[in-house]
């Protein structure tokens, strides 16, 4: 499926991400804001791609073999003078295009080696192959014309040209803070899986009968059957709503009227030193955050004074109930969230766009 013309300055290429991905939308917005024309080559429904993209070409999500094929082929389908690659498996093929004369930007938005520890399939021969492929991709990313990383601790640490671009909000997709719904409602936006606290969120809502919960994002295949069965139970039926994958402006429309945002990530190697994007976005929407005690997200929530850090499901339920029982607490934390801002976001996106502009003009 396609949309628009294909001749452009920059091609954003992904073999594993849906074109509705929020970071992809932010990158494209920053690039088009400085006048670059951008093509997106990825997965999913082209109507969910960044509306400012000049051209969009998508294919359906397939299995592991299909993804491997896409990782080899998709960089060669791109028409931009600069290739921005979002996935480690597409880096080697993209590197060959660099040898052929294109400029290469590798966006490393997670510590991929640590992330493999959180994937059920990454064991045995498959896991060994994945770790080897990740090592090769990281080595090549280090030598790209520009290496963009989502946080200071994300490898490669010693790159030829390295830019830290945190997942701070950018692009106008978040709603402005507004009045609350009459009934308490919690929100989660992002990928849904066990290690991201999926079932913890459901259990916390089950024990807090005044609350409902909107879960916005794709559910991991390994967890889908168990989740669907759990949501049929009387204690959560109709109160936990699956909203599915949506482009950022649609996903964050559910923040209007919500009381709190949830970030229940488990303490895994991939998440331990991370600040989830959603925490920044909750705060920007004026939502207090209930978060697990991962060091950096806990520090952010505590320093802003806009939320509470909880160690388990029972503590999360108590936090939810405290907002119902104490409206002054809720309003105080909402005010703290509304007053939070991080101006480095706009500066970093401008720096990123300027660096890509320089490559496109060479």
Image: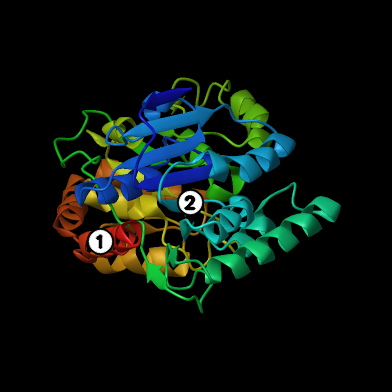
Q: Dot 1: what SS?
A: helix
Q: Quadrant of the C terminus?
A: bottom left
What's the residue at 50%, 49% (across, down)? 314
Q: Is residue 287 left or right of residue 27?
A: left
- The relative height of residue 301 versus residue 234 in the rendered view (above or below) is below
x and y percentages locating residue 3 in the rendered image:
38, 25
Identified at 42% across, 38% down, the residue is 40
Label 1: how many residues lie within 10 Å, few (<14), some (14-19) or many (20+)? some
Tell me the colour scheme of the image.
rainbow
3 in relation to 317, above or below = above
Q: Nearer the viewer, mark 1 or mark 2?
A: 1
Residue shown at 68% from the left, 36% from the top:
222
Q: Position of residue 348 (x, y in %)?
A: 27, 64
Q: Residue furthest right?
A: 125
Residue 192 visible in rendering: no
**Residue closer to the observer: 51 or 361:** 361
Q: Nearer the viewer, residue 20 or 31?
A: 31
Q: Which residue is mark 1?
A: 345
Q: Are marks 1 and 2 in contact (CB under 8 Å)?
A: no
Taking 240 as reference, is 282 above or below it?
A: below
User: Count of labels shown?
Assistant: 2
- Residue 264: mark in rendering: 2
Where residue 150 sits: x, y (%)? 42, 62
Please state the horizontal and vertical placement of residue 38, each as a whole percent of the image: 34, 42
For numbered disc 2, what is the local secondary structure? loop
Q: Please report whichever mark, 1 or 2, sits nearer to the chain's N-terminal start.
A: 2
Tell me the tag on residue 265. none
The crowd level at tag 2 (other Cα within 10 Å; few <14, some 14-19, many 20+) is: many
Q: Residue at x 38, y 39 (%)?
A: 39
**In the displayed structure image, the side of residue 200 where residue 306 appears, left or right:** left
How much space separates mark 1 and mark 2, taking CA atoms? 24 Å
The answer to whether residue 205 is seen in the rendering is yes
């Amino acid at each position: 499926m396609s949309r628009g013309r294909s001749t452009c300055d920059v091609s954003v290429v992904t073999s594993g991400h849906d074109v509705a991905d929020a970071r992809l939308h932010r990158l494209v917005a920053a690039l088009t804001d400085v006048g670059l024309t951008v093509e997106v080559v990825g997965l999913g429904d082209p109507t969910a791609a960044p509306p400012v993209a000049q051209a969009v070409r998508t294919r359906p999500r397939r299995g592991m073999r299909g993804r491997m094929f896409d990782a080899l082929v998709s960089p060669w389908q791109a028409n931009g003078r600069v290739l921005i690659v979002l996935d480690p498996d597409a880096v080697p093929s993209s590197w060959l295009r660099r040898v052929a004369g294109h400029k290469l930007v590798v966006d490393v938005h997670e510590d991929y080696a640590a992330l493999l520890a959180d994937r059920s399939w990454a064991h045995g021969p498959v896991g060994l192959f994945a770790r080897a492929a990740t090592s090769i991709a990281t080595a090549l990313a280090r030598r790209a014309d520009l290496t963009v990383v989502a946080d200071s601790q994300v490898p490669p640490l010693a790159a030829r040209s390295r830019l830290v671009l945190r997942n701070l909000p950018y692009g106008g997709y978040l709603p402005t803070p507004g009045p609350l719904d009459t009934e308490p409602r919690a929100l989660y936006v992002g990928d849904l899986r066990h290690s991201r606290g999926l079932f913890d969120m459901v259990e916390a809502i089950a024990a807090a009968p005044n609350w409902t919960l909107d879960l916005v994002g794709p559910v991991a295949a390994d967890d889908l059957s168990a989740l669907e069965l759990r949501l049929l139970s009387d204690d959560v039926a109709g109160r936990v709503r699956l909203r599915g994958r949506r482009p950022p402006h649609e996903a964050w429309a559910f923040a209007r009227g919500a009381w709190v945002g949830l970030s229940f990530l488990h303490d895994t190697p991939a998440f331990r030193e991370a600040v989830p994007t959603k925490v920044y976005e909750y705060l920007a929407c004026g939502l207090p955050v209930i978060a697990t005690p991962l060091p950096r997200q806990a520090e952010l929530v505590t320093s802003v004074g806009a939320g509470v850090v909880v160690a388990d499901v029972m503590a999360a339920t108590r936090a939810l109930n405290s907002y119902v029982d104490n409206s002054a607490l809720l309003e105080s934390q909402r005010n703290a969230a509304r007053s939070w801002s991080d101006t480095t976001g706009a500066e970093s996106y401008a720096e990123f766009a300027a660096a890509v502009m320089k490559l496109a003009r060479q």
